[in-house]
Image: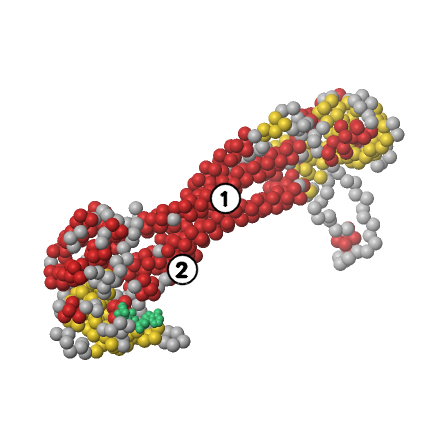
Amino acid sequence: MPLILSIALTHVAGRLRQSVVSVLGVTLGVGFSIAMAALMEGSQHDFIATLVDAIPHVEVTDDQRDPPPPPAATRFDAVNVIGARPDDDTRGLRNPVRLRAMLASWLPGRMAASLNGQAVLRYGGKDVAISLTGVDPAAHLKISTIAEDMRAGSFLDLAANLNGLIIGDGVADKLGASLGDTVAVSASSGAVRRLKVIGLYHTGVTQADDATGYTVLKTAQVLFSRPNAINRLSIRLDDVNAARAIAARVERMTGYRATSWQEANEGLMEVLVVRNIIMYTVVGAILLVAGFGIFTIVSTIVHEKSRDIAILKSLGFEQSDIRRIFLTEGLLIGLVGSVLGSGLGYALSLTLGSLTFEVKTEIELTSLPLYYSPVHYLIACAFALFSAGVAGYLPARRAARLNPVDIIRGAA
Amino acid sequence: MSASETAATSTHDGPGATTEAEAGPLIEARGLTRILPGLVPVTLVRDIDLEIKRGEFVAITGPSGSGKSSLLYLLGLLDTPTSGEVLVNGKPTHLHSEAKRARLRLSTLGFVFQFHFLLPEFTVAENVMIPMRKLGKLSHDAMRDEAVGLLSDLGLADHVDKRPDQLSGGQRQRVAVARALANQPPVILADEPTGSLDSKSSEQVFEILRDLVDRRGKSVIAVTHDLDMAARMDRRLHLIDGRLADPPAEGV
Ligand SMILES: Nc1ncnc2c1ncn2[C@@H]1O[C@H](COP(=O)(O)OP(=O)(O)OP(=O)(O)O)[C@@H](O)[C@H]1O
Ligand SMILES: [Mg+2]
C-alpha cells in the first residue's frame, strides 16, 4: 500500500465514528440524488413519450418562417412601404403531390396530409367551436395514435362515410350530442354541412378532447371551400429525437414552416429543464452539506495530527506529500460514501419502482416511471468526489503549510 | 535493487558512506543568521560560521534560549536562514525549492528530537520504515529487514512489532534514532536526545550515538545541556545569545 494512503487510513481510522458519520452524509447525498434522478428522468421520459406519441413529430404548415417582403418593396427598392394592401394569397401547401414526392425519398418516417380549419358545431341550439381536420383516415392512422383513444366507433369508419364526423368526447358533452346524432357544421367561409357523429375519442389531453374533430379530407375541402387543397403535412418519425434536424431540413427544402415537436412544446421543454436544474440544485445542496462534514473531520485531523505533520516534514516529506495525505482522507470518505451511496440509490430506485398506485381512471395499477442510467451514478459520484476533494483540499493545504519548526518548538 | 541493497549493507557495517565530496565538510554554515520578523524582530542566531566533517561528534551547548535548537533546525534545512547559507556536501542550499530541501532531509539528514515523535498508529518497525518507504528504493521485505536490523543494533529486537506506547521512554528514543538512521544519512542532528530520559537510558542513547560516529562514520551534531556528555564528544560549539562563543573554561 502506498505510504500516503496508509498514513491517511490510520488518521481516518483514528476518528472512526466521525468518519462514519461523514461517510453516511455522502452516502445519503449520493443515494438520494441517484434515486431522484431516476424518478425525475423516468417521469420525464414517460411524459415525453406520452406527449410525443399523441402528436406529429414534425408538422409542415403553410406558413413561412420569414414572410416575404411585400412585392411593392422589392419592386420599388423602397425602405418602407406604407399603406400597401397585402396580396390575397391563396393559402395552403402548393402542389402537395410534388411536395410529398420530394420528402418521400429520404424521410425516415411516414407522413399524412390534411386540411385544418376552424368550424362551429351546432346541435340542439348549442354552439361549440372546434379545430376541424380533414384527413385521409388510413394515412392518418399511420401518423397518429388516435385509434387507441377511440371510445366509440372506429376511426376508419370515416373512410366509408363522407358525412361522418369524429369528435372528442368533451365536444360531444358540450354539445349534448352522442354517437349517431347529426350536427350542423359551419365554416368561416359560410358553408354549412350536416355531419353525423360516428366516433368519439378521449385522449386525456383536454385541449384535444374539448375542441377538435376529424372528418374526411374531401368534406373538409368542400366545407372550407378549398378544393384539392391541403395546409398541413404531419410527419411521424422513426426516431423522435431526430425531429429538430429533420424539421430544419424539410424547411430548407420546401420553404414552408416545419415545426418539430420540441419547438411546438418549447414551454414544456423549458419547464423540464427548470425541473432538472432544481433537482440538481437540491442534490448539490445535499452533497455540499456532506462536504462540510468532510471539511470538519479533515480539519480536526489536521489539528490533532500537527505533530505528526511536523515530524513527517522533518523526515523528508514535501509539502505536496502532506497535502496528498489529507486530500486522500477527504477523497477516501467521498469514495466510500459514493460506493455505498450508489448501492443505496439503486436500492431506493428498486423500492420506488416496486410501489404501485391505483389510478382512478384506469383499472390497471400504475407504478412510478423510473429510468435507470449509469450517467446518474457517474454524475452523483463525480459530484460527491469533487466536493470531497475540495473539502479535503482546504485543510490539506493548511496542513502542508504548517511550519514544522513552530510545532516542534511548541511541543518541546 | 541489489546494488542499493549491497550499498546499504556496507554502510550498515562500517564507515564508508563514500561520496565525491569526501574530502570537504559535510555541512557548512556561512554567516548564518535567522531573525524572526515581527513588530519586535527576534534574533535566533547571528553570524554563525561552522564546518562539520565526516565522522565528527559535535556538541552544541549553551544556556537556555541561546539558539541551539534554532541553529540545529537551520543546519537540518528545516528552517531557512534570514541571511547566510548552509552548504550540504559542499553545495549551497539557499536556492533549493522546498521539495528539494525535503529530499535532502530524507536522504542526508536524520533528526532526533527531545521527544520521540513516533507515529502512534504504526508499529516500531513501521515507524522506522516510513522514511524508507518515502524514499522508495527498497522492496517491502528489504525495508523490513533493514528496519529490524537497525532496531536489533539498538537493542530493540524484541520490540519491533509493538506500538510505541508499549515502550519505555528510553526505548522510544532509540526507535527514533533508528528511524533517523533509516535511509543511512551521513549526518544525524539531535536536539537534546537524552533530555527527557533518566541517566541510565541517557547513557544508552549516548553510547549509541558514539557508536554511530566511531563504527559507522556518521557525523552527529547533538544539542545537550549535559556538560559531561559534551565533554565526551569530539568537539564543542558553544552558543551565547545566538552567537558562537568560547566554551566555558571547565569544559575540558
Ligand atoms: N516563535 C518565536 N517567537 C519569539 N521568540 C522565539 C520564537 N522561537 C524562539 N524564540 C526565542 O529564540 C531564542 C532561541 O530559541 P531556541 O529554542 O533556539 O533556544 P535553545 O538554545 O534551544 O533553548 P533551550 O535550551 O531552552 O531549548 C529563545 O530566546 C526563544 O525564546
Ligand atoms: Mg532547544
- Residue at the spot 38% in from the left edge and 49% down from the top edge: A15
| Location of residue B57 in the rendering, given as x and y in whole percent from the top left corner | 15, 67
Quadrant location, ligand no. 1: bottom left
x and y percent of residue A110 in the render? 63, 31
Residue A161 found in image quarter:
top right
Residue closest to the eye, A227 or A47: A47
Dot 2 alpha-carbon crowd within 10 angstroms: few under 14, some 14 to 19, many 20 or more: some
- Is A370 displayed left or right of A83 in the figure? left
Name the quadrant containing residue B219: bottom left
**Residue at the spot x=30%, y=67% of the render?**
B79
The residue sitting at 32% across, 56% down in the picture is A308
Q: Is residue B124 left or right of residue A290?
A: left
Residue type marked 1: Gly
Task: Residue type at mark 2: give it.
Answer: Arg
Residue B115, x across and y down, in percent: 26, 60
The earlier-in-sequence mark between 2 and 1 is 1
Q: Secondary structure at mark 2?
A: helix
- Residue beneath the point at 20% across and 51% down: B147
In three-dimensional space, the C-alpha distance between marks 2 and 1, rounded to whole angstroms, equals 27 Å
**Residue placed furthest toward the right:** A125
Mark number for residue A398? Answer: 2
Give the structural element (helix, strand or loop) at label 1. helix
